């Protein structure tokens, strides 16, 4: 008989960020979205900046909980999913003003890089991706709540 639930553990380098039970985990693997259900084969890899969705079972319907993740690593083993990341934020608690300011700063840095060699373009692109992902997640959440 199979176990229909996964235990999800989220850690940063120095602390536990959360523990959850889920029937499915969807995460942004480095090469695309990955869906994990109970009894998944042992598996692991790198996560990119993006959305982690935990589908939980509540009575007779499935509910989704969405989180921003800053990248990191994941491992699946024995119905346990371990996520290692530095940033894990509930989509319902993202600071849109801060994300918009970060997006604007990153775009300004990229514009400056066209004229100055001392700007770290890779860092500016990573900051832009994080900010735009947070903004997109927030917009998706608002649309989900409106429907």
Image (cartoon, rainbow, N blue to C red):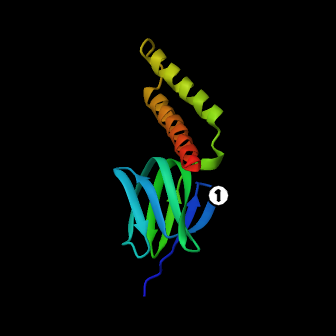
- Give the residue displayed 50% in from the left and 35% down from the top: 132
Q: Vertically, is 75 above or below 125?
A: below
Q: Is residue 45 left or right of residue 92?
A: left
Q: Secondary structure at mark 1?
A: loop
Quickly name the residue at label 1. 15
Name which quarter of the figure residue 38 lies in: bottom left
Tell which residue pokes out farthest to the front in this image.
147
Q: Nearer the viewer, residue 107 or 85?
A: 107
Residue 104 spot, x, y in % from top left: 55, 24
Residue 139 spot, x, y in % from top left: 54, 40
Q: Vertically, is 57 above or below 147?
A: below
In this figure, what is the number of numbered marks?
1
Tell which residue pokes out farthest to the top in this image.
115
Residue 43 spot, x, y in % from top left: 38, 66
Mark 1: few, some, or many residues within 10 Å (few <14, many ≥20)? few
Residue 50 spot, x, y in % from top left: 47, 46
Q: Vertically, is 59 above or below 47?
A: below
Tell which residue pokes out farthest to the bottom in this image.
1
- Give the residue displayed 57% in from the left and 60% down from the top: 10
- Give the residue displayed 54% in from the left and 69% down from the top: 61
Q: Vertically, is 11 above or below 86?
A: below
Q: Nearer the viewer, residue 57 or 33?
A: 57
Q: In which quadrant of the rendered image does the N terminus lie? A: bottom left
């Amino acid at each position: 008989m199979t176990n229909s639930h996964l235990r999800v553990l989220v850690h940063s380098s120095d602390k536990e960020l959360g523990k959850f039970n889920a029937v499915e985990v969807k995460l942004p693997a480095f090469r695309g979205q990955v869906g994990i259900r109970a009894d998944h084969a042992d598996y692991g890899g790198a996560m990119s900046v993006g959305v982690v969705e935990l589908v939980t079972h509540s009575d007779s319907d499935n509910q989704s909980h969405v989180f921003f993740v800053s990248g990191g690593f994941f491992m699946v083993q024995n119905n346990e999913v371990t996520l290692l990341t530095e940033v894990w934020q509930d989509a319902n608690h993202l600071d849109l003003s801060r994300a918009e300011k970060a997006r604007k700063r990153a775009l300004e840095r990229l514009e400056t890089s066209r004229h100055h060699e001392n700007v770290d373009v890779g860092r500016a692109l990573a900051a832009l991706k994080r900010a735009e992902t947070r903004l997109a997640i927030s917009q998706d959440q608002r649309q989900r709540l409106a429907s």
